[in-house]
């Protein structure tokens, strides 16, 4: 079965808020698009990818869907709509006329209010997504992760996708503040988790596969192979070794799984969760 990278980004720097791309993040301050990514997918034997929004701008939805017209391997788009909009139901109906719009995300971890995701107006928006069964990606820092179980319980029919394992403190090598809330999310059957974004939470210059191992092992134990998705988090991963190294590290960590379990993580689960066409 085709292998799908469930988490990539593109941006046009002239139409992007690059205010955070300073200091060590400055290498990301340039355009990144499909022609940059495709050779990396080919090198790792990845057949397709899912774009995930990188700014809270609805115009990017149409831009990336246009890119998908040009690049058939771009299998889905996790876009953005304002969850607090009064006409969100109508917006979702219009957006879903293109079935490649397969989910939504909000830059939750950028909100000044750490409780943004459980605000009443946001909760009403999540209820709209639940009615449409439109997946929502949870972009959390560890301090937000305690909200994951709450959101899942309020909206049990809403598919929720935890990005980057909730950004545990891999560089510090700690789990105590992360693992309880990660476990609580795993106990909710409507939550799945992306094995993504780990190397940028580690020591960019000195991380090893073993630095990632305990976090992947916890994910495998708690979510199981049927609720985990491979994602590269490209291009941010270029800051910490790049696409091929990130892929090779995860592949090593999953080497003990059966062929069917690996197939689930590397593509089958993404197709199921996001409703991708075969």
Image: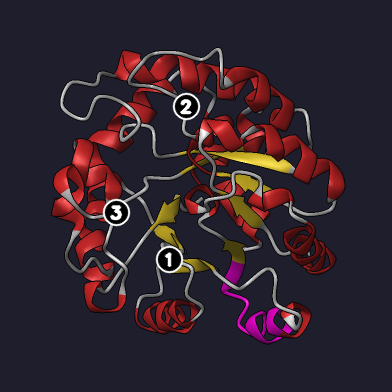
Which x, y percent locates residue 6? 48, 52
Question: Please, which residue is most extreme toward the front here?
Answer: 112
Q: Is residue 95 magenta?
A: yes
Residue occupying image coordinates x 26% and y 62%: 38
Residue occupying image coordinates x 48% and y 68%: 56
Which x, y percent locates residue 176? 55, 12
Residue 277 visible here: no
Q: Tell me the element at label 1.
A: loop
Which x, y percent locates residue 253? 40, 21
Dot 2 or dot 3: first in sequence order is: 3
Q: Determine which residue is flagged by label 1.
A: 55
Dot label at residue 168: 2
How far is the residue under mark 3 from the one under mark 1? 23 Å
Q: Foreground residue, 262 or 224?
A: 224
Q: Foreground residue, 43 or 103?
A: 103
> Which of the 4 image quadrants contains residue 63?
bottom left
For the residues carrying marks 3 and 1, which lies nearer the camera in this image? 1
How far is the residue under mark 2 from the one under mark 1? 22 Å
Left or right position of 243 against 181: left
Left or right position of 166 against 18: right
């Amino acid at each position: 079965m085709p292998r799908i990278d469930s988490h990539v980004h593109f941006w046009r720097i002239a139409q992007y808020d690059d205010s955070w791309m300073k200091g060590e993040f400055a290498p990301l301050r340039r355009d990144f698009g499909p022609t940059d990514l495709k050779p990396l997918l080919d090198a790792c034997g990845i057949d397709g990818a899912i774009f995930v929004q990188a700014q809270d701008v609805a115009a990017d939805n149409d831009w990336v869907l246009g890119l998908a017209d040009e690049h058939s391997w771009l299998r889905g788009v996790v876009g953005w709509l304002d969850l607090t909009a009064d006409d969100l139901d109508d917006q979702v109906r219009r957006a879903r006329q293109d079935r490649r719009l397969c989910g939504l995300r909000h830059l939750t971890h950028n909100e000044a209010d750490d409780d943004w995701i459980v605000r009443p107006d946001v909760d009403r928006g999540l209820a709209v997504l639940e009615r449409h069964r439109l997946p929502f990606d949870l972009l959390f820092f560890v301090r937000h992760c305690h909200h994951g179980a709450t959101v899942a319980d309020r909206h049990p029919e809403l598919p929720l996708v935890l990005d980057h394992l909730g950004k545990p403190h891999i560089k510090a090598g700690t789990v105590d503040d992360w693992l309880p809330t990660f476990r609580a999310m795993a106990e909710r059957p409507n939550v799945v988790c992306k094995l993504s974004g780990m190397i940028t939470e580690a020591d960019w210059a000195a991380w090893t596969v073993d630095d990632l191992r305990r976090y992947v092992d916890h994910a495998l134990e708690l979510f199981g192979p049927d609720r985990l998705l491979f994602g590269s988090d490209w291009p941010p991963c270029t800051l910490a070794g790049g696409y091929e190294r990130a892929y090779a590290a995860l592949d090593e960590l999953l080497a003990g799984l059966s062929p069917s379990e690996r197939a689930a993580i590397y593509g089958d689960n993404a197709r199921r969760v996001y409703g991708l066409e075969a």
